[in-house]
Amino acid sequence: MLLPWEYGVRNLARRPLRTALTLVALATVVMLVFVVVGFIRGLEQSLAVSGDPDVVLVYSVNSEENIENSSIAARTPALLTASVSGTVKRFGITHVSPELYMGTRVTNDNDVEGLGLVRGVTANAPLVRRSVKLIEGRWPGNGEIMVGRLAAAKMGSDDAALAIGKQLVFEGQPWTISGKFAAGGAAYESEIWCRLNDFQTATQRQDLSLAALLLSPGKSPAEVSLFCKERTDLELRALSETEYYASLQQHYKPVRMLAWLVVLLVSAAGVFAGLNMMYGAVAGRIREIATLQAIGYRRRAILVSLIQEGVLLAAAGSLLSGVIALTLLNGVAVRFTMGAFALRIDSVAILVGCGVGLLLGVLGALPPALKALRGSVAISLKAV
């Protein structure tokens, strides 16, 4: 026969200070798990939504995964449109976006300097970068820029410093912010966009970093790749945008593995902290446990009751941490080497966080409960 369910609940209320301290400790451990898993999920989501399967990137073969180091001839987009037939063309406009992309030091009006990612584009860019949406202001004119909604996080600045009408200084000249854009969580959201010719003049460069082509439905990037292989003098490489960001997923795989290792270490630390607190809680209840055995309750029933108390505390701590994570952490911008992305507390993060919390409740209560139940009933009844 098991002990009544309310017996374990009343035991938690009998020691409010110990219960509160244990609850805070468990909630803190679970919160750390939410932060790390939210980081992993945010990074994965940002890379997953950045790629467009119909877009092909053409860049220098020597740059590998780092497009910032790419340099191709300014005539490359014209050669591509003349040689590749699968590119979308509407109303006489070929959907090709020549771009100059680089990281540079950016200073805002408050003299706060940070590393920003700047992309020089033409008016064709929205035709190819279909996820980009202007959410405030207007498209930049001469000497103007528009900023992604996570550009402030990438620079380590506040959003107010990147409001419309404010100025940023990079590459030795001031730029006025004319608009703000979003891209559905894609990597572009941490970038600063300006006119290509203005950016080339400021950087004293006439080359490009890449050319992005929007292919017609059903067309394969193979034709673009074949052109790049035939024109060995141009030293070009063609890769679909989804494949490019998939390669970044592999590039950041060690980082994600390290983050999962942190989750494991935090969980292990939480188990040991739970063991320490539960040993203290059970040590003061030796006579109570022995009395329950003396009046006829089996050890298995008492063990279940003690585990119930640990699971109740862990569930409460997980629920508290989950509410805080969803309200305060979800969507918080985080700086990273590739730019910036938002922490993502999604169903996977909730499942992992709450699962770790419940596991802490079971593993934290089980060893001390087993140790207390191994003792002799007669000796335990005399315990002080």
Image: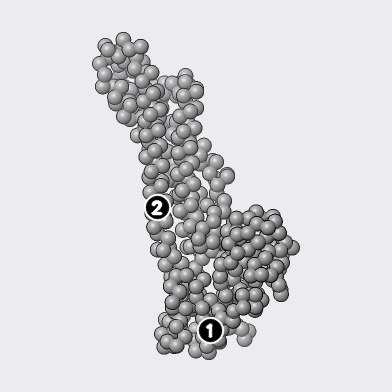
At numbered mark 2, what does the secondary structure look like: helix, strand or loop?
A: helix
The answer to which of 118 and 250 lies nearer the viewer is 118
Please give the name of the residue rendered at 66% of the width and 76% of the height, measured from the top-left corner. Answer: 198
Does residue 133 appear in this view? Answer: no
Please give the name of the residue rendered at 46% of the width and 24% of the height, measured from the top-left corner. Answer: 18
Left or right, residue 303 beside residue 234: left
148 w.r.t. 127: above or below: above
Q: Position of residue 383 (x, y in %)?
A: 33, 12
Does residue 348 appear in this view? Answer: yes
Q: Which residue is mark 1?
A: 73
262 w.r.t. 56: above or below: above
Please give the name of the residue rendered at 69% of the width and 70% of the height, measured from the top-left corner. Answer: 173
Callout 1 environment at 10 Å: few (<14), some (14 to 19), or many (20+)?
some
Image-quadrant location for residue 89: bottom right
Residue at the extreme top? 382
Q: Which residue is mark 2?
A: 258
Q: Position of residue 366 (x, y in %)?
A: 33, 30
The answer to which of 338 and 8 lies nearer the viewer is 338
The answer to which of 87 and 156 lies nearer the viewer is 156
Report the amino acid beneath label 1: Ala
Q: Position of residue 294 (x, y in %)?
A: 29, 13
25 w.r.t. 71: above or below: above
Left or right, residue 118 beside residue 354: right
Image-quadrant location for residue 239: bottom left
